[in-house]
Amino acid sequence: TTVFVLNGPNLNLLGRREPHVYGNTTLDDIETLVREKAGTLGAAIMFRQSNHEGQLVDWIQEAGAQGAGVVINAGAYTHTSIALRDAISGSGAPTVEIHISNVHAREGFRHRSLIAPVSVGVICGFGPMSYVLGLEAVHHVMTERAR
Ligand code: DQA
């Protein structure tokens, strides 16, 4: 399988940003973890980050056009973006929504996700491991669908 691991706004600051919420692990550290798991699964990974909503839309469309899956931490766009939701449903790319923190244990505005209804499922609250679990989940769904 090919899986796009997409990161939205402010995730470039991981490790320095609110470490009491998000921990000390950087996005580069997370990429290393994801690539290790991808190696054992035999998955090819496109690991990307952007602070720009439209860039994320372009990447989701690219994943769909390639028949790739998506693991996305959309950051705050999770809670606001109809454009990301439409990109996921329109592209047909099987998508797993992930979050580092347990968004349901936080402010009320983080409890609603606009992308969850068009995702295969949601993983949140496991820190950097949420990415690894998300990769396993989307890889599983794609290999089940292919057989
Ligand atoms: C986040 C949770 C979001 O609510 C927040 O806006 C983020 C990070 C997480 O990974 O826990 O930027 O997606």
Image (cartoon, grey):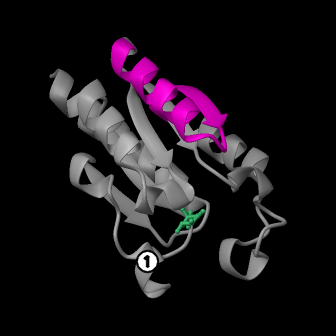
Q: What residue is shown at x 76% (from left), y 61% (from top)?
A: 25
Rendering quarter of residue 94:
top left
In reply to whether residue 120 is colored magenta, the answer given is no
49 over 100 or under it: above or below: above
Asked whether, in this view, residue 21 is left or right of residue 116, the answer is: right
Asked whether, in this view, residue 93 is left or right of residue 46, the answer is: left
Ligand 1 position by quadrant: bottom right
Predominant SS of the magenta segment = helix
Q: Residue 56: horizontal and vertical position, in percent?
A: 53, 35
The residue to which callout 1 is attached is: 109
Q: Looking at this view, is 43 or 68 the one in front?
A: 68
User: Tag 1's secondary structure?
Assistant: helix
> Is disc 1 surrounded by few (<14), some (14 to 19) or many (20+) residues within 10 Å?
few
Which span is picked out in magenta? 37-65
Q: Looking at this view, is 126 or 21 the one in front?
A: 21
Task: Tell me, yes or no, if residue 57 can be seen here.
Answer: yes
Q: Residue 105: horizontal and vertical position, in percent?
A: 45, 86
Asked whether, in this view, residue 81 is left or right of residue 46, the answer is: left
135 over 39 or under it: above or below: below
Task: Tell me, yes or no, if residue 1 can be seen here.
Answer: no
Quadrant in which the N terminus is drawn: top left
Quadrant in which the C terminus is drawn: top left
Rendering quarter of residue 117:
bottom left
Q: Looking at this view, is 121 or 139 the one in front?
A: 121
